[in-house]
Structure formats: structure tokens, C-alpha cells
Amino acid sequence: MVIRYILMFALYSFIGWVMETIFASTLQKKFVNRGFLIGPITPLYGFGAILVITSLSGIALLEMSPLMTAISSIGLSMLLVTALEYLTGYLLEKIFQAKWWDYSGHFLSINGYVCLKYALLWGFLAFILIQIIHPYITSFIEGLPEMVKVILVIIFVICFVIDFIVSTKIAFDMRKSSNNRTNLSLEKHF
């Protein structure tokens, strides 16, 4: 079971990184590696996906109409992932004194970490995740031989830990070298 969750985390973190990178690169008309880590994963998406998948399994047990189930799923997903995004943004800023994203100019922004526009987007993406993507990911993972799963998890964990250590060191070095810590722009460095 743990192996399955690590593989889901790895796949959803990679899918999230691809989406973020395409989105940011398209807007800026150049390659932009979004996220805290150097490698091609954004853990916020991995944690968010697992949080939504595990939380929404309880909604499926409730006796509601399909429409109410969909509305409840989207609403709960919006709340959960938006709370996770807020907590992540807050912690990154407090630890590294830098913002990886800033929604300050957006409608109903809360401290620049979250806003209504992206909360709605999270709800929509979570609905797509549960209805379309997750069944394929589950089938893919279940179809892998156990030994392959173990090897993939070992490789992923080693790469993730190395990336986390290197990325953390870089972020702390950037913080030390910055004279104006509250306005540290990460785009200059990546």
C-alpha cells in the first residue's frame, strides 16, 4: 500500500510539474521550471492529489445523487487543495523568505498565497483527476510487477531526497545572498 502511494505521489508530482511548466513557459515565452525542486516534480501536486483521492473516497460512500456527489467533491477538493497551497506558500516564505507564487493582485486573494480563481481551478482539476486520470493511474500501477514497483520507488525516493537536499541548499544560499529578503525574486535564479 505504501509503495502504491509513493508511486502515485511520484506520478502526480510529475504531471503537476508538466502542467505548471507548460503554463508558465507559455505565459513567459521561455522555459520556466516552476516549483521548489530542481527536478521535474512539484510535490504540491502529488500531496494534493493524494489528499483529494483519500478524502473523496468517503464522499463516494454517502448516498447522494450524482450531481450532489460531483458538487460535494469539487467543493471539498477546492477547500483541501487551497488549504494545502496556502500552507505550502506560507511555509516556503517563512523558511526561505521568498515567494514561489504571488496571487496578491487576484480577486479574493489571501496573503498572496491563494485566490478564488485558482481555488476554482483546483476544484475543476480535482474533478478531472478523480473522474478521468486516477482510474488510469491506478490501473497502470496495479499492472506493474511488484519488483518493478519496488525498484521504481527506490529510484524515486533516492532522486527525490537528493533533489530536496540540493534545492534546499540553493534556496538557503539565495536567501543568504539577498540584501532585500522580503522581495527575493526567484525568477532571477531559475
Image (spheres, rainbow, N blue to C red):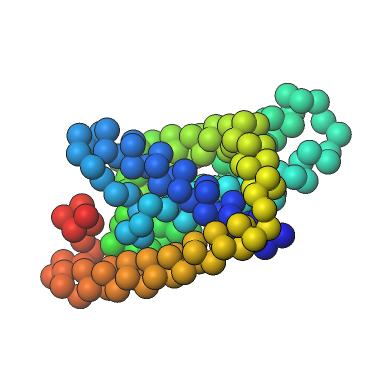
The residue positioned 76% from the left and 41% from the top of the image is: 59
Q: As drawn, which residue projects farthest toward the right? A: 63
Q: Is residue 59 left or right of residue 119?
A: right
- The residue depicted at 69 percent of the width and 35 percent of the height is 72
In the rendered view, tell whether residue 136 sits above or below residue 173. above
Seen from the viewer's position, the closer of residues 73 and 34 is 34
Q: Position of residue 58 (x, y in %)?
A: 77, 46
Q: Nearer the viewer, residue 103 or 175?
A: 175
Q: Nearer the viewer, residue 104 or 135?
A: 135
Q: Is residue 38 visible?
A: yes
Residue 152 locus on image (x, y percent): 55, 59
119 up-or-down from 84: above or below: above
Q: Residue at x 43, y 53 (%)?
A: 42
Count of labels in the image: 0
Residue 31, horizontal then vertical, whole percent: 23, 42
Name, please, the residue furthest toward the left. Answer: 179
Work out which quarter of the rendered image holds the C terminus and state it. Answer: bottom left
**Res 153 → quadrant:** bottom right
Q: Quadrant of the N terminus?
A: bottom right
* Image point (23%, 63%), residue name: 182
**Can residue 44 be seen in the rendering of this structure?**
no
Position of 164 relative to 105 (above/below): below
Q: Is residue 144 left or right of residue 125?
A: right
Residue 55, image x and y in percent? 69, 49
Out of 18 and 91, give the one closest to the viewer. 18
Q: Quadrant of residue 129?
A: top right
